[in-house]
Image (cartoon, helix red, strand yellow):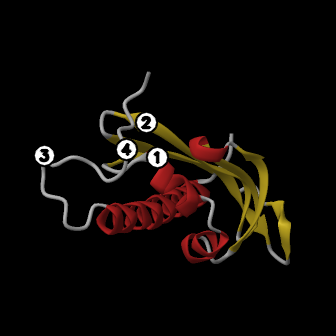
Amino acid sequence: MPTIDLVDETFIAVDRGILAPIVADQVRWHAWWPKWRMSVFMDRGEQGIRWSISGSLVGSCEIWLESSLDGVLLHYYLRADPSAPGRPATPRQLPSSPRGQRVAAGLRRQQALAWKAHAWALKDELEAGRRPGEAARGPSTRAS
């Protein structure tokens, strides 16, 4: 099992067709994950993207965009290990000692908080000016 195994969901009241190009924008990737090298291994168009990652972490990352109600559930998955010192493409296993477990928990927390900050900033950007209960931006995204 990877050291970091995160799953997150954020609802954004916007059409998936508006959010998908933002998720596909490589400039955003570099802003969201500046210490990673991203390699797309599955581009799912409006449904999201899956990457292999290397750099400070080694593993995989995914954003899945699921139409829900009048918006999108932005699902985020991160499965990774810290990289070995001096070898950014090689995973490093932390010891199972109490110290190793604390380090792993700290890494998980750091990644979870960093991603949530990006997701909320994206939500704020795309829902700017929308009052609670108002329709989402873009055409209806109700699932068929």
- Decide: few, some or many residues near mark 1? Use Cα within 10 Å; few <14, some 14-19, many ≥20: many
Nearer-the-camera pick, 98 or 76: 76
Q: Which residue position holds label 3?
A: 133
Which residue sits furthest front? 139
Percent x, y of residue 49: 66, 49
Q: Amino acid at mark 4?
A: Pro
Inspect this view and state whether residue 101 appears.
Answer: yes
Q: Is residue 61 left or right of residue 101?
A: right
Labelled pair 2, 3 in contact (Cβ < 8 Å): no
Quadrant for the C terminus, please: top left
- The residues bearing labels 4 and 3 have C-alpha atoms spaced at a distance of 16 Å
Q: Which residue position holds label 1?
A: 16
Q: Is residue 94 left or right of residue 20?
A: right
Disc 2 versus disc 4: nearer the observer: 4
Nearer-the-camera pick, 117 or 98: 117
Q: Which residue position holds label 4?
A: 139
Q: Which residue position holds label 2?
A: 67
Inspect this view and state whether residue 95 appears.
Answer: no
- Above or below — where is 56 with respect to 11? below
- Decide: few, some or many residues near mark 3? Use Cα within 10 Å; few <14, some 14-19, many ≥20: few
Q: Amino acid at mark 1?
A: Arg
- Above or below — where is 24 with respect to 65? below
- Decide: few, some or many residues near mark 4? Use Cα within 10 Å; few <14, some 14-19, many ≥20: some
Q: Earlier in the sequence, mark 4 or mark 3?
A: 3
- Decide: few, some or many residues near mark 2? Use Cα within 10 Å; few <14, some 14-19, many ≥20: many
Disc 4 versus disc 3: nearer the observer: 4
- The residues bearing labels 2 and 4 have C-alpha atoms spaced at a distance of 12 Å
- The residues bearing labels 2 and 3 have C-alpha atoms spaced at a distance of 17 Å
- The residues bearing labels 2 and 1 have C-alpha atoms spaced at a distance of 6 Å
Disc marking residue 57: none
